[in-house]
Amino acid sequence: MRTALLHYWLTSMRGGEMVLVQFCRLFPDADIYTHALIPEKIDDIITRHPVHESCVARMPFGRSHCQKYLPLMPFAQSRWDLSEYDLLISSESGPVKGVKKPSGCFHICYCHTPMRYLWDMYEEYYKNSGIGAKLAMRSFKNYLRRYDLKSAECVDRFVANSRFVADRIKRIYGRESDVVYPPVDTNYFRQAQDAERKYFLMVGALVSYKRPDLAVDAFARMQNETLIVAGSGGMFDELQKRASSNVKFVKSPSKEKLRELYAGAKALIFPGIEDFGIIPVEAQAAGTPVVAMGEGGTAETVIDKVTGVYMREQSVTALLEAVESVKSTDFDLSSLRSNAEKFSTASFLANFRKVLPQGVVTENVTE
């Protein structure tokens, strides 16, 4: 079957792009369609495929700030000629699932989430946006919501990256979905040499909904413990200014640095509510327990009192209680690592093959 892979935009390597890497491995002859590509920021497993950009990429700052052209994207992708394809696989948390499907073609949407900034987290994004972005959100919200609902009708089969997202797909689109957890490089982090565990660790994008402020404020009350915050994002400077002396920062850590940080951490602090959350799985693969909310993706990846501790609410007090619980719990290394293996690349490949239409042939990759 002639296959096309669809992805909203290719401007950095995050969780969605790592899923696309595995699709590229399964379908090495597939073409890729996306609104914008920055090749130097993307894995060459992706860029060795023929990549077709939409007209968004040719707009002013269309590659560096393609999200600003979101209202234009439905029109832009309507210009793609997909008539020669038998199978479409969209890696999606934007509008690209709404492409016009050729007659007889089958469309699988691997949905990272229905767009948070349109639906469940609209108010959060609006509150933290500038004046121009707020005006745009007000102006285009209803149009984009109508389009998003209509675009779901173009999909033959939804695949969600967690049960949490599957529930959201059901509530917003009225559609059932299979759950296939995204791939995590558990082998790489499993190989971390366990150093002496001296500090607590928070990893990820430093943006408001991930609640890094809770971690920074909680450790201001725990001067006998060290917190390392590793990441980047709009709150980086603000967090540095409000942090106490026992909170250290590592900006934009490499994958190698992350492995080192996981190996030396007493626990990962993960107070946000995520659709899935790759970082807690990486930590468990390295033998590091997780302090997290028992909601969203971490309710599916972290086992309370076995591979981590759940916070009872998103508050400084609840985080402090959970940290004290982690400190007094003896976690079994083999349980941490075996739980992480449920979300390995091999598991993803095996489970995704099960949702493909009968007769579809993929490359024989297993890890």
Image: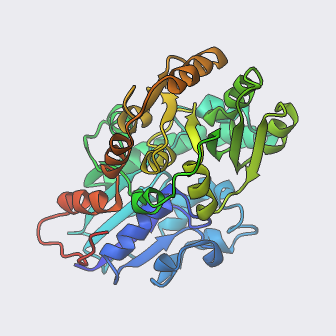
Residue 348: image quadrant is: bottom left
Q: Is residue 202 above or below residue 55?
A: above
User: Residue 302: x percent and y percent?
Assistant: 40, 35
Quarter in which the C terminus is drawn: bottom left
How many numbered circles are shown? 0
Q: Residue furthest left?
A: 358
Q: Is residue 296 left or right of residue 318?
A: left
Tell me what residue is drawn at x 70 percent, y 23 percent: 218
Q: Is residue 101 visible in the rendered structure shown here?
A: no
Tell me what residue is drawn at x 34 percent, y 65 percent: 89
User: Residue 217: x percent and y percent?
Assistant: 74, 25
Q: Is residue 248 visible in the rendered structure shown here?
A: yes
Q: Is residue 177 left or right of residue 216?
A: left
Q: Nearer the viewer, residue 309 or 297?
A: 309
Q: Nearer the viewer, residue 34 or 243?
A: 243
User: Residue 48: x percent and y percent?
Assistant: 48, 85
Residue 254: image quadrant is: bottom right
Residue 253: image quadrant is: bottom right
User: Residue 221: x percent and y percent?
Assistant: 75, 20
Tell me what residue is drawn at x 79 percent, y 34 percent: 246
Q: Residue furthest front?
A: 196
Quarter in which the N terminus is drawn: bottom left
Q: Is residue 61 left or right of residue 295?
A: right
Tell me what residue is drawn at x 36 percent, y 69 percent: 23
Q: Nearer the viewer, residue 200 or 340?
A: 200
Q: Nearer the viewer, residue 335 or 116?
A: 335
Q: Is residue 322 above or below residue 231?
A: above
